[in-house]
Image (cartoon, rainbow, N blue to C red):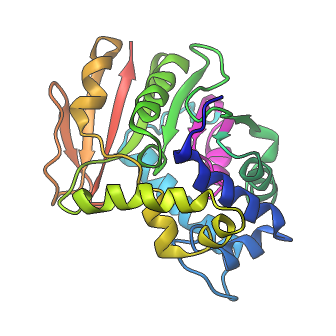
């Protein structure tokens, strides 16, 4: 497989998480995990609580709370160590957690075992960073939050297509992206330099534990709604773009919705698959 430098920071972060004794140690020692904070008083339970709150809000605001939700299936692209996965396993009957790094998937099982319903969980390794090893039309909901902005643009678009491919007709994709902003002319080139440093032995491990450096290194793309919706429009029966009330993102042919809980730099594409 060709070298894919945009994946290096995640692999370094996964190796760091593998070396910790517990999930609590992961959130205490890695600033990229716990809302970009570190400290000896932080716990995995607190980390999961932040995901519980967000999952509850998104399920309600995006209209996903159907009477049979506990019988439906969900695929989460970019589960990390399971911050939101726990809540999904409590809400839905079947959850498949996907991530680039096998170390994260192991931690995800640990986290859900403590704070979710692990009997409802399976994991899937995204080995190439762009392809889901899941059957077509196999899930009711495909969800991804703060993942696609960390991918190469082509990989983000391919993962979006994969999300549509695995979702059943009548099911929904609920996908989060970051749009272009004023500072990106500097930030995106800077992120390429930082990702190059991540590939340096030992230095990459150290960098992955540093809040600001890791955040810069993971900013791999910016995509506007039309870049997402346009190629996939024939596969959708309806599309919504959800944004912060202070934002101005919109997509051609999409209904624009506002929710204060959306980061002003982000937007969500919520669409029903034909």
Q: Residue at x 68, y 88 (%)?
A: 41
Residue 242: image location, x then y, percent: 27, 44
Q: Residue furthest bottom?
A: 40
Q: Residue furthest right?
A: 21
Up-down relation of residue 254 to residue 14 (above or below): above
Residue 182: image location, x then y, percent: 17, 60
Q: Quadrant of the C terminus?
A: top left
Q: Residue at x 47, y 32 (%)?
A: 155
Q: Residue at x 50, y 26 (%)?
A: 163
Left/right placement of residue 107 relative to residue 194 reads: right
Up-down relation of residue 135 to residue 67 (above or below): above
Task: Decide if residue 81 is in sight here.
Answer: no
Q: Which residues are magenta?
A: 71-97
Q: Residue at x 71, y 35 (%)?
A: 125
Q: Quadrant of the N terminus?
A: top right
Residue 88 lies within the magenta run: yes
Left/right placement of residue 148 relative to residue 203 reads: left
Residue 159: image location, x then y, percent: 49, 30
| 113 vs 252, nearest the viewer | 252
Image quadrant where residue 3 sits: top right
| 208 vs 86, nearest the viewer | 208
| 239 vs 2, nearest the viewer | 2
Task: Decide if residue 196 is in sight here.
Answer: yes
Residue 212: image location, x then y, percent: 46, 74
Residue 124 lies within the magenta run: no
Image quadrant where residue 224 sits: top left
Up-down relation of residue 32 to residue 87 (above or below): below
Up-down relation of residue 33 to residue 106 (above or below): below
Report the number of discs.
Answer: 0
């Amino acid at each position: 497989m060709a070298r894919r430098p945009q994946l290096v920071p995640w692999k370094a972060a996964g190796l760091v998480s593998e070396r910790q004794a517990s999930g609590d140690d992961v959130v205490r020692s890695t600033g990229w995990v716990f809302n970009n904070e570190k400290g000896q008083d932080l716990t995995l339970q607190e980390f999961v609580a932040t995901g519980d709150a967000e999952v509850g809000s998104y399920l309600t605001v995006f209209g996903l709370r159907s009477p049979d939700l506990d019988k439906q299936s969900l695929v989460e692209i970019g589960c990390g160590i399971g911050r939101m996965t726990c809540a999904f396993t409590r809400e839905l009957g079947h959850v498949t957690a996907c991530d680039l790094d096998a170390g994260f998937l192991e931690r995800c099982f640990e986290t859900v075992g403590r704070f979710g319903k692990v009997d409802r969980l399976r994991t899937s390794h995204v080995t190439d960073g762009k392809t889901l090893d899941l059957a077509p039309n196999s899930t009711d909901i495909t969800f991804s939050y703060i993942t696609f902005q960390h991918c190469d643009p082509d990989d983000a678009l391919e993962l979006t297509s994969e999300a549509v491919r695995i979702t059943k007709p009548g099911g929904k994709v609920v996908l989060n992206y970051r749009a272009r902003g004023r500072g990106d002319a500097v930030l995106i080139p800077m992120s390429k330099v930082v990702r190059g440093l991540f590939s340096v032995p030992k230095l990459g491990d150290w960098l992955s534990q540093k809040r600001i450096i890791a955040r810069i290194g993971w900013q791999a793309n910016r995509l506007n709604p039309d870049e997402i919706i346009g190629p996939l429009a024939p596969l959708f029966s309806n599309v919504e773009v959800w944004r912060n009330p202070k934002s101005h993102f919109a997509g051609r042919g999409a209904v624009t919705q506002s929710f204060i809980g959306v980061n002003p730099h982000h937007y969500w594409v919520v669409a029903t698959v034909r």
